Image (cartoon, helix red, strand yellow):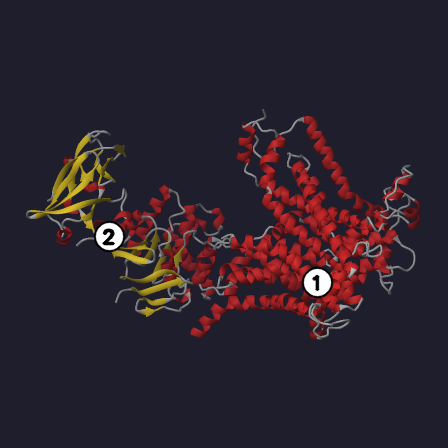
Amino acid sequence: MSQASPDNAVRTNVPARVAIYIALILFAVYYLLPFYVMVVNSLKPLDEIRGGNMLALPQQLTFEPWSSAWSTAQIGVQATGLKPYFLNSILMVVPAVAISTLLGALNGFVLTKWRFRGDNTIFGLMLLACFIPFQIALIPAARILGLLGIAGTTQGLVLIHVVYGLGFTTLFFRNYYAAFPTELVKAAQIDGATFFQIFRRILLPSSGPIIVVTVIWQFTNIWNDFLFGASFGDFDSQPMTVALNNLVSSSSGVKEYNVHFAGAILAALPTLVVYIVSGRYFVRGLMAGAVKG
Amino acid sequence: MPTRVQLQNAIPKLVLAPSFAAILVFVYAFIFYTGYLSLTDSKMLPSYGFVGLENYEKLWKLPHWWRAVTNLAIFGSLYIVICSVLGLLLAILLDQKIRAEGFLRPIYLYPMALSFIVTGTAWKWFLDPGIGLESVMHHWGWESFSFTWIKDRQMAIYTVVIAAVWQSSGFVMAMFLAGLRGVDNEIIKAAQIDGASTATIYRRIIIPLMRPVFLSAFVVLAHLAIKSYDLVVALTGGGPGQATELPATFMYSYTFTRNSMGIGASSAIIMLVMIFSIIIPYLYSELRGGPRQ
Amino acid sequence: MAFLEIRNLEKSFGKVSVLKGIDLEIDKGGFLVLVGPSGCGKSTLLNSIAGLETITGGSISIDGRGIDGLHPSKRDIAMVFQSYALYPNMTVAQNIAFGMEIRGVPKAVRDKAIGQVSDMLQIGHLLDRRPSQLSGGQRQRVAIGRALVRDPKLFLFDEPLSNLDAKLRVDMRTEIKRLHQRMGTTIVYVTHDQIEAMTLATKIAVLKDGLLQQSGTPAEIYNNPANTFVADFMGSPAMNLVPVAVHKNGSGVAISAERDNLEPLVLTVPNAPAGLAGHDGGKVIFGVRPEALTDRDSADRNARNIAEGECLIEVVEPAGSDTFAVTRLGGKQVTARLRADANVAAGQKAKLAFNLDKAVFFDPASGQRIG
């Protein structure tokens, strides 16, 4: 019999452990393979991909596909590369993340520390909004953006992403602030602090972890969005994902696989960097988004 | 004086109001608007000629829509089942006191950080018979190897499953891993003392305890499946032919490229009904347990 | 007019009524303790005084000034919370001065006030630390310091000792009492611990289900409980409450308690309250505290009315300073408090002395005391 172990992993014998490791490594290969394919083939000349083995390392290393994808590749009708769209994405993501996070924090503060009749119903309606298929909103949203005069602009996309992100950001902060001692808010009230003073001086300084989780969640979702970008963006506002899809699926000319892969990596890079730098918070956000209440 | 107090008391509601109003308009009013459009003769632009349920009748007579719904059934059920099984398997393997867990876990999970457009691009070329897996096998000497699913009307939908499972299964693993780590260690010790084997402990004790995680995973995956749009666009563009159309792509093409907004709207409403019939009972049961306070 | 006056206070959450018409007052310099089981409304009452809950009906005034509708910060109160509620991101000094900072008090004045308070509470060496670096007792002191520095008309304490371990709780209790005696402040203090209530209060208010059961000095509450709830809640071990039959007996009144396998225990009550005779032939509840039920030798020498009865001892519990003997009367377990070395044993009979000077009687239907 094994010793009582301090954690709940059940002990197994040696051949079984070898099998487990082999299985785990095979799975790791499966998950890494597509990314490996992208990286390797983004560094090959086109002939080498067409005539050679996709899994082989490049024989003739070239960074040409990367520079092409970044600055000269044909996207739709213009040969601008992905650069302007990368900028579009940044200009869209930064304000959308900041605004939706701030509003989520304020909403979470109200919904936990300033309870009023019907607050749970309001929260339920906001939470349900996280799950609607966005197809339901496409037609009216296009009209509203037109009426507001921001159709096809970055502001329009920011507005859309803020609104449809509010449910999640509110959920995150509400669950976090629910565990924040209400007595601190009461003490601050007796000290004479106003609503915003309490928020800024008492709650915000303790909100670091949940802000990180929310920012990462929103950043990932908004950066990776395709549907809204494709529906409501034009050249001056289309995000990276739409441009990548245009690059890859353009029917004219030769299929420059190496450029496509380089572009795909460029589109994935910001979220990948965030994930690598703060994976712990990324996972926490995923879990918070999945397990409600 | 009283007015200032009243103002102070109203601040929390005033803070919440813009978010709630935005959600009321952009979610609930939009649902009503789309619902109304689904009852009209809208074509390229919204029109308000009331036609009753005609669009729904037309919709359910369209082979194209049936194709999309059938595909969703195939894709959704395989996606949910495979992700859950794979996720649970990976979580159990990783829970065996694996030394390299900190190294392996992020590898399984990183696809979740990627845009579906990136995932679609990577798999599109990796599964392409001309340059991808099939060609690789030929290079390695397996001349008879054939893998042309992505070009095959019968099989193309399964390539969507492959790519989607690759993207999401790591996330399901993370959910199960959190669940496994939450199992009371003393229960397992008690079972060990009762003489239960590792397999029995998992089968009879631990996996049954994972019921809530299965439920959460089901809800998350089901709603992702119904919303799936980007991946199909990037991977197959809905083709070959209409072989990989899903309701989400159907809605987009009928509304914006085929000028049948009424039918597009009715398909969006059906998507909404599908999602709400899964989400609302779930949220209701989760929220009824009350917020953690 | 009393310093703090609460008149017909009502509070309800939706349809649930939490406070049902509370009338209560305390004089300047008094120490009012609100005590009761959880859910009795005592914390809601305290929050209503603080202005953290809006009241549904009635009025509250402090020092002759109505405070209804005033913001908590405008009521000239300070509050010490159960969890101490120290702001985790601020140092001890910042915690103490936060209220002054909000009011725009100049830094020099703030620093002086911090200095005075920290000297008084001996927390000067902690001023630069954060709450997470403090022990429970230190946090408690800082929380009190934060209240003191406001120099309010009224101090509110919400179960301030319940998060401390037993030893520290006793020490802090003494310290709060000393602070009150020295500063002469007016305090309202919530607790569920009846010993805290007895030791600290100049006036106790016992609440249950949103109703004030009784208010009075600790001695009044202890010796003359208004009803069986107060009798049972205050005191440890609790007062013995025995159902007895009443019958007139010549000049006085006699009570008899049923016993298993023994003839009923009959006691004559020479000093019976006037109302007791009205229950002739019926039943009442006879209340006697364990210390008024003892062995002959240790009975109160000043007691004028002592009745003896032989009882079967079921359990003996030596507690060091005393020995508790448990018997059974009227179907109820009854505890007697005997000398530490009292000669009793389980299963044997012993003669117990009932100090009837201290006996109280309750109406079995209403639970109210018979006067």
Q: Residues within 10 Å of mark 2 (few under 14, many from 20)?
A: few
B134 horizontally vs B117: left or right? right
Q: Badge 1 is on which residue?
A: B268
Cα separation, mark 2 vs mark 1, equals 67 Å
**Rendered image: mark on residue B72:** none
Q: Tell me which chain the residue with mark 1 is part of.
A: B
When asked about the image quadrant of residue C295, the answer is top left
**Residue A13: percent from the left, percent from the top?**
66, 26
When asked about the image quadrant of residue C353, the answer is top left
Tell me if I can see residue B140 in this picture.
yes
- Name the residue: 19% across, 49% down: C361
Q: Badge 2 is on which residue?
A: C365
Residue closer to the observer: B244 or C78: B244
- Amino acid type at mark 1: Ala
Q: Secondary structure at mark 2?
A: loop
Residue closer to the observer: A226 or A41: A226
Instruction: Tell me if residue C276 comes above or below residue C71 in the rendering.
Output: above
- Name the residue: 30% across, 47% down: C195
